[in-house]
Image (cartoon, rainbow, N blue to C red):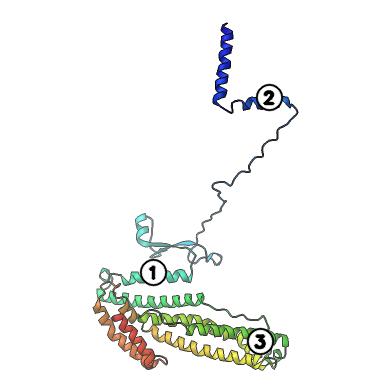
Amino acid sequence: LEAAEAADAGEEAAELAGEGDPHANEGTDATIEEDANPGRVEEPEPEEPPGPPALALAPRRVALRVCEKALPADRADAECCYFLKESAEQVVDTPTLLDAHVQHGSLSEGPSLQTLDQMLAQIYLPLLSAADTSTSTVMDQDSFARTLRELESSTGKFTSQVAQTVRQLREDVHLDLPDVSIGDPQIAAEDDVLVGKIEMAAVGWSSTLQSTISAEKGKTVPGRGPLGEIEFWRDRNAALSSLFEQLNTPRVRGMVEVMEKSPHVGAKTIEAFRVQFAELTKLYIETKDNVKFLTTLERHFKAISHYRQMPGGNLQTVLDALSPMINALRMVWIISHHYSDDQRMGGLMLRIANEIG
């Protein structure tokens, strides 16, 4: 009886479990079907391909090289850091002496004109402008201040030259030159194939000159102050000087000579090139002359434009700069070929008045 009651209790528990879980009998049914078909083989489910790793590290070889003085030619554009000791005789063997006598820094793209321009304009010139003339222990305060101002002026001129070179390289326009060899221009002028290549190149030169000149004539002087006038002519000089220098190389001059002597070149092609080249020459000479004379006025213009950023700068600084600036303007008025008229000099004086006012 006890065994029968236990069996009945087990059946009741199984029924109650089946009522509570609708999927309770699925396993039993599957087992029965599998037993009923013993020859059936279930196909395994295809495995999913593994996904990309969360973080993949590519092997990288890092080498640290050390050199003295100049970088090797094959590493001139490499990222580097530098250390400069104040004196070759100075012995640096402690952290304190290292901080006191060694300057260091990094060049993210290697030594370049762009990096030099940024370091001069953003680091060294501001340091010279903010230098305290009362800290000298070598010479008296007035002599030290005068020497410091001369150094600042020379550094400013050098910075301007570097910036102009960077601007010229950035805005450089390259002319397409045909791959031809010219010996005797008279003999080359009889070669139809050679002359045809030169003529096609000349048409492209004329188009490039025309578009460049039109673009430069359409530009206006930026800002309201006199420094904008200097930047305007420097930008124009950078845009025109490369074209002018390329067209005055012996190679291009030889091509032009062959084109002028050849009877196979149309008169319109030669005339169009002559007109555009004459216009470029005129504009380039004017631009170069203006940059030369306006550069002599730059330090005076900076004195009246940036006096608020100078240590101890105030309106007295502007008053002190007016007299030498007027004398420099008078010299430009007398000597310059393009700032000796009322329009140009009057416009420049108006910009000076706007800056002071």
Q: Residue at x 44, y 75 (%)?
A: 163
Label 1 crowding class (10 Å Cα cut-off): few <14, some 14-19, many 20+? Answer: few
Give me the disc on residue 122: 1
| Residue 293 place in picture, x, y as percent | 40, 86
- Sequence-wise first label, 1 or 2: 2
Question: What amino acid is labelled 1 in the image?
Answer: Gln
The residue lying furthest to the front in this view is 19
Residue 261, quarter of picture: bottom right
Give me the disc on residue 305: none
Indicate the quadrant containing the N terminus: top left, top right, bottom left or bottom right.
top right
| Residue 212 place in picture, x, y as percent | 53, 82
Alpha carbon distance from label 1 to label 2: 86 Å
| Residue 24 place in picture, x, y as percent | 59, 26
Q: Using the image, determine if residue 192 lies above or below residue 28.
A: below
Secondary-structure class at tag 3: helix
Question: What amino acid is labelled 3 in the image?
Answer: Glu
Alpha carbon distance from label 1 to label 3: 48 Å
- Foreground: 61 or 47? 47
Alpha carbon distance from label 3 to label 2: 94 Å
- Sequence-wise first label, 1 or 3: 1
The residue lying furthest to the left in this view is 316
Give me the disc on residue 199: 3
Q: Residue at x 56, y 53 (%)?
A: 61
Left/right of residue 116 with respect to residue 211 in the rendered view: left
Give me the disc on residue 32: 2
Q: Residue at x 56, y 11 (%)?
A: 6
Q: Nearer the viewer, mark 3 or mark 2?
A: 2
